[in-house]
Image: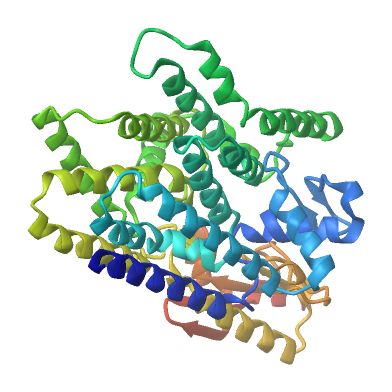
Amino acid sequence: MIQYYKKFTALFLILCVYILLTLLSVNNGYFWDNIQLISNNAHWLYQFGLKSVFAPMSSESYGISSTGYHPPLVGTITAVLWKIFGYKLWVSHVFTFFFAIVLIFNLWKLIRLFFPDQYQGWVLLIVLLESSLLTQFSIASPDFILFTAFVVTLRGILHHKQALTAIGVFFLCFISMRGVFAGVILFFVSAYFSVYKFTNKPKVPDFYRNLLPFLPTFILLILYFGTYLYSYGWFFKPNSAYSEHYLMPKTFSRIVIHFAEFILRSIENGRIIIWILGIYSLFKLIKSKHKTDLQIGFLFWLFMSLNGLYFLFVFISQMPFSARYFFPQFFILTLLTLWGIIRFVSEKYLKWIFMLILIFELTGNLWIYPDKMSKSWDNTLAHFPYYQVRKDCFDYIDQQKLDYNYISAGFCLYGNRKFVELKNDDKTVGVNTNNKYFIYSNISNLNDSLCFEFKNSSNWKPIKKFEKGFVTMILYENLKFKQNEN
């Protein structure tokens, strides 16, 4: 009864946190990559209907851009929900809350495979209160849905539920290309374990049974990518904003910097405590020569495969990393770490270790780097003041009747405001840094040279500053532009 009470308390606390975040976020606009991955795609479908599923890479007429290598499932569902419930911001947040319920239920079922009753509540708290996950939930991100689909798929595999696996892998692979990577790795690792089971006698029928729940999604993926490539050609056009991300690094120093970024994004926002404890658990496991069961071995090789893929990207791409990219592998690492800690640490210390992990995770929302260092603002709840600061800034611009043709800004602020705010006003902010006005924000992660330029009082004059919490926004006037007008 006591263990049941503890688990119920953990579950109740989790539900309260996610309900509170939903209420606080329900009218917040689209943030970070969600502007493109959800809103842009949804607007295209909302305007033209499902007969035009593929939004173009760019459309000057409508100001809409798309990344075709990310399947547009979330944007498609969002457009349909707008048609049903209305063109409202709350639609995305309530939709994401539904996936939170799915995640909590399936995670609860999954952790019962690996942990005794008395520790299941702690595991639930540690997994679901991680700062990056909470933030991705609060901004209604596709990556939160991707993580939910990953947990559902994993549970389907380990519980031998083919229908659940098929549903999970469909959502996993059609959320984004990262989901495709995770889905393919899940298939190969699960296929290996189902066929060999640590023996040298392959069981071919098991391979086909393992393939069956993955097959519909893989066929649909082939049809999707084949149709897209036939219709539009390669995903990355020359000189596009994303083409450089998938080019080989040209210098060794660029590889070193990329590797440092990989390490930082893996351990930031409090995740470092899981890595430290995970390495300690691995050391104790090797030293004790403790034999692990099949399911733990499956998790270990799944983690190694997922993490190894992104480590490979350090050397073959210039793709910028984000903590949210590592949701699946970090989740597996968390399970493995907690499994090891429970076995190799005295029971009287476990509660304190669990509390220490939770404290580290919560302080993950306070990891704010100096201005010259890029921050993944979509992985920390410290970004929350942004919505009010943004509103105050644009309210001032509207009150002063400034011409939007002469206003530019950085990431998250440029583009048509309706894609963020879901308002019918077509007020588009440019990207030209030589415009008459420029909205600077530390959210935008501007180049160091541009940040330095704004401090040059002979060229730029700060008109109005808006600030709340860790978020700053400054409206600058370009004095050179004014001189050119005269």
For the point 28% across and 68% down, the residue is 6
For the point 71% across and 77% down, the residue is 482
For the point 31% across and 54% down, the residue is 271
The colour mode here is: rainbow
Q: Residue furthest bottom?
A: 399
Q: Which of the image's four quarters has the N terminus?
A: bottom left
> From the viewer's perspective, is residue 143 above or below residue 121?
above
Q: Residue furthest front?
A: 1
Q: Which of the image's four quarters has the C terminus?
A: bottom right
Is 29 positioned to the left or the right of 330 in the image?
right
Residue 246 percent location from the top left of the image: 58, 34
The residue nearer to you, when weighing 84 against 156, is: 156
Task: Please identify the quarter of the rendering in which residue 424 is found.
Answer: bottom right
Give the number of marks. 0
Residue 122 percent location from the top left of the image: 28, 61
Q: Residue furthest top?
A: 201
> From the viewer's perspective, is residue 451 above or below residue 192?
below
Residue 79 percent location from the top left of the image: 79, 60
Q: Is residue 337 visible?
A: yes
Is 443 positioned to the left or the right of 390 in the image?
left
For the point 82% across and 44% down, the residue is 54
Is 355 positioned to the left or the right of 170 in the image?
left
